[in-house]
Amino acid sequence: MSTLAELVDPLCRVHDWIRQSVVEACEAYEPAELAADARRGAGDVSFAIDRISETAFVERIGAELGHDEPVVLVGEGLPGGRMTLPESAAESDARWRVIVDPIDGTRSLMYQKRPGWILTGIAPNRGEATTLADIELAVQTEIPLVKQHLADQLWAIRGQGAQGVRFDRLTGRSHPLAVAPSSATTLRDGFATFCRFFPGGRDVLAAIDDALCERLLGPRAADAADVFDDQYASSGGQLYGLTMGQDRFVADLRPLVAPILAARGQMLGHSCHPYDLCTKLIAEEAGVVVTDPTGRPLAAPLDTETNVAWVGYANRELQRLIEPVLAELLREHKLLAP
């Protein structure tokens, strides 16, 4: 039986293979072709580019991990969102439960706006009771734009810190990458984002965003740009930003606005799912604090459909500064119970 440490290299090789396959597809096809044939799968809309990565993942994960012992795979593009490798094995025979997002940030990547990410988390198989909190190994790998020659890969084993390398497509070599979140103790002159990627409840989320900044920093001066916003439609990319010192605070509260939308006769649109957050362990091992909107640890089930609201703080000091104000605002806007 493989230990967690023994799973790191095979999993990184799987990610390397997917990265290469997707980059080659982006070089060979126009964005309109990669965005074609959209269909709804387990948890999200799937595009042509997604099926390239999904196929590559299943092929390689079977070769790298499935031959040693059975594993349960959970992720987009799989039949019913889940399968066992080898397929003849029972789920109860598997020691590990592997949750994956073969491309996180598909929409930006297929139009060559921003990189995408391959996300994988591995947890001891506890059946349906397995949650994000059980993940003990995570790997995330950047899928670069065609015009981009450097791509990062991060991984972590619980209790052993976060590690990373930067891969150079031109030389084929990787170099160690320093992993360090921001040590800032204020949002001033930094990136802090309330996610509102898609229509539905944007007015509510923007109002909370503005109120939080004003309560933390005071009234804005003329021509001031105290806090910056970055609507990067990739949860893995946002976790990377927190982990690497680019971002100080991220709040994805989209599921909380569902009652408000229902009162307006509207449906909640696409939200974050567990596979989008399956690499949060890397951020946490680096020192980032990731919680649910009430400040509790995230413990969503490892499935493809649960809507997850989450908050990320680059460090404990920022959590102590922001969390009470955020909770107060969420109660005022009736997104949390009094």
Image: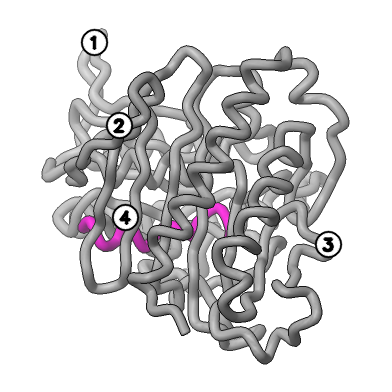
Question: Considering the numbered disc 2 on the image, is that residue within a helix, a strand or a loop?
Answer: strand
Mark 1 is on which residue type?
Answer: Ala
Does the magenta-highlighted stretch encompass residue 2?
Answer: no
Among the two numbered marks 1 and 3 on one chain, the one whose residue lies closer to the N terminus: 3
As measured in the structure, the alpha-carbon distance from the residue carrying label 4 to the one carrying label 2 is: 17 Å
Q: What label sits on residue 283 in the rendered view?
A: 4
The residue at 66%/84% (across/down) is 128
Q: Residues within 10 Å of mark 2 (few under 14, many from 20)?
A: some
Marks 2, 1: nearer the viewer: 2
Q: Position of residue 188 (x, y in %)?
A: 19, 31
172, 85: nearer the viewer: 172
Residue at the outermost top position: 223
Q: Is residue 132 above or below residue 208?
A: below
Among the two numbered marks 2 and 1 on one chain, the one whose residue lies closer to the N terminus: 2
- Residue at the spot of label 3: 79
Among the two numbered marks 2 and 3 on one chain, the one whose residue lies closer to the N terminus: 3
The quadrant in which residue 245 appears is: top left
Question: Considering the numbered disc 3 on the image, is that residue within a helix, a strand or a loop?
Answer: helix
Among the two numbered marks 3 and 4 on one chain, the one whose residue lies closer to the N terminus: 3
